[in-house]
Image: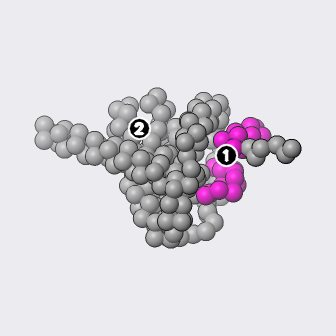
Amino acid sequence: MSAPNPSFSDRLEAWLDTRDRLTVGDLNHALDERTFALVLMLLLFPAALPVPTGGVTHVLELFAVLVVVQMIVGRRELWLPRRIRDHHLGSTFTGKFVPAMIRRVRRFERFARPRLARLLASRLAEALLGVVLLLFVVGAFVAPPFTGLDTLPALGVVVVCLGLVFSDALIVAGGVLVGTAGVALEVALGSAVWSLL
């Protein structure tokens, strides 16, 4: 009797455990499923946690903009400048954020299944989702520091990317709703502050 195939979360965890020094370029070669979605998920996950990050998330969000723009224009392989590709993500990312991310991926994995997979794989859907993800990444980036307003837009990116990895349109839709709520909250609070000033 053959052993069951390892789950996506098990393979991701095993791959990350083999890396003593994780770079942005390493993320590009992590697994064969949806490279763009996987890299975006890993880059935005720290901002999606409601914890202080000391500004490290802004650097990752800048990298994420470059990734999502390539997704929009339809590149098949992710290109990164050498300086970004060789950027070391640090022990905080690998020791704190990665284990938390693996736990959350496993939660989604329990009920994820292919839903409208062919639609998600179409070029038009990929471009449209890329535009939506770009808005969420920018929303997370421009959020004032230490306000927590970057959490929902970043979480929207993470959930959409998980939906793409699992080819599940229901999860993608949930991520779009979360990210949209986060950006709307930023706009509403920004407008209120502007009115007071």
Answer above or below: position of 107 versus 124.
Answer: above
Q: Nearer the viewer, residue 83 or 40?
A: 40
**Mark 1 → mark 2, Cα distance in angstroms:** 25 Å
Give the x, y percent position of residue 140: 40, 45
The color scheme shown is one colour
**59 or 32: nearer the eye?**
32
Instruction: Report crowding for label 1: few under 14, some 14 to 19, many 20 or more residues within 10 A (C-alpha).
Output: some
x and y percent of residue 118 in the render?
54, 66
Q: Which residue does the numbered mark 2 point to in the structure image? A: 151
Disc 2 marks a residue whose amino acid type is Thr
Placement of 169 over or under 141, stated as above or below? below
Q: Nearer the viewer, mark 1 or mark 2?
A: 1
Which of the 4 image quadrants contains residue 22? Answer: top right
22 magenta-colored:
yes
Q: For mark 1, what is the residue? A: 8
The residue located at (37%, 33%) in the rendering is: 148
- At x 45%, y 42%, the residue is 155
Tell me if residue 196 can be seen.
yes
The answer to whether residue 61 shows anywhere in this view is no
Is residue 13 within the magenta segment? yes
What residue is rendered at 51% in x and 56% in y?
Answer: 115
Tell me the tag on residue 174. none
Query: Tag 2: Cα neighbours inside 10 Å, few (<14), some, or many (≥20)?
Result: many
When the figure is inspected, residue 32 is found, relative to residue 17, above or below; the finding is below
Q: Position of residue 52 (x, y in %)?
A: 46, 29
Q: Residue at x 65, y 56 (%)?
A: 33
Is the C terminus in the top left, top right, bottom left or bottom right quadrant? top left
Tell me where residue 150 appears, x and y as whole percent: 39, 40
Q: Are marks 1 and 2 in contact (CB under 8 Å)?
A: no
Q: Secondary structure at mark 2?
A: helix
Range covered by the magenta-colored residues: 7-35
Identify the secondary structure beneath mark 1.
helix
